[in-house]
Image (cartoon, grey):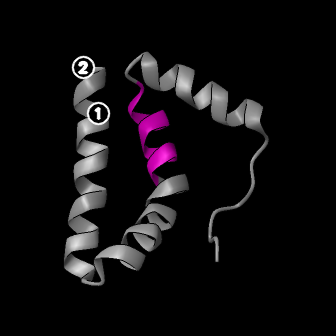
Amino acid sequence: MSTRKTLPKINEQKLIEELKDNSKIAFEKIYNMYAKQLYAFCLQYIKRSEDAEEIVEDIFIHLWERLQ
């Protein structure tokens, strides 16, 4: 059950490169591409919506902080 539209790998690779250059737009696009899918994955194991949301938030916060 994937809500993410399949994008060519080259677009993902380009976003990753832009993300490495601290692009907020690239970060937002990556978030929009993966947050729902990651949330659904977490929810399979965590079972509590609030906890799954917090895990997803923590992952993306950690990603952004690592890039700074």
| 25 in the magenta segment | yes
Disc 2: which residue: 68
Left or right placement of residue 54 versus residue 11 in this view:
left
Residue 65 percent coordinates (x, y): 22, 29
Q: Look at the numbered disc 1 and give the secondary structure of its residue.
A: helix
Residue span colored magenta: 23-31
Residue 30 percent coordinates (x, y): 50, 44
Name which quarter of the figure residue 5 lies in: bottom right
Residue 42 percent coordinates (x, y): 37, 68
Q: Amino acid at mark 2?
A: Gln
The front one of 32 and 25 is 32
In the displayed structure, would residue 49 be above or below residue 68? below
Q: Quadrant of the N terminus?
A: bottom right
Q: Look at the numbered disc 2 and give the secondary structure of its residue.
A: loop
Left or right placement of residue 63 versus residue 32 in this view:
left
| 6 in the magenta segment | no
Q: How many marks?
A: 2
Q: Amino acid at mark 1?
A: Trp
The 10 Å Cα crowd at callout 1, few under 14, some 14 to 19, many 20 or more, is some
In the displayed structure, would residue 66 be above or below residue 41? above
Left or right placement of residue 49 versus residue 15 in this view:
left
Q: Residue at x 75, y 48 (%)?
A: 7
Q: Residue at x 26, y 25 (%)?
A: 66
Name which quarter of the figure residue 12 lies in: top right
CB within 8 Å, label 1 to label 2: yes
Disc 1: which residue: 64
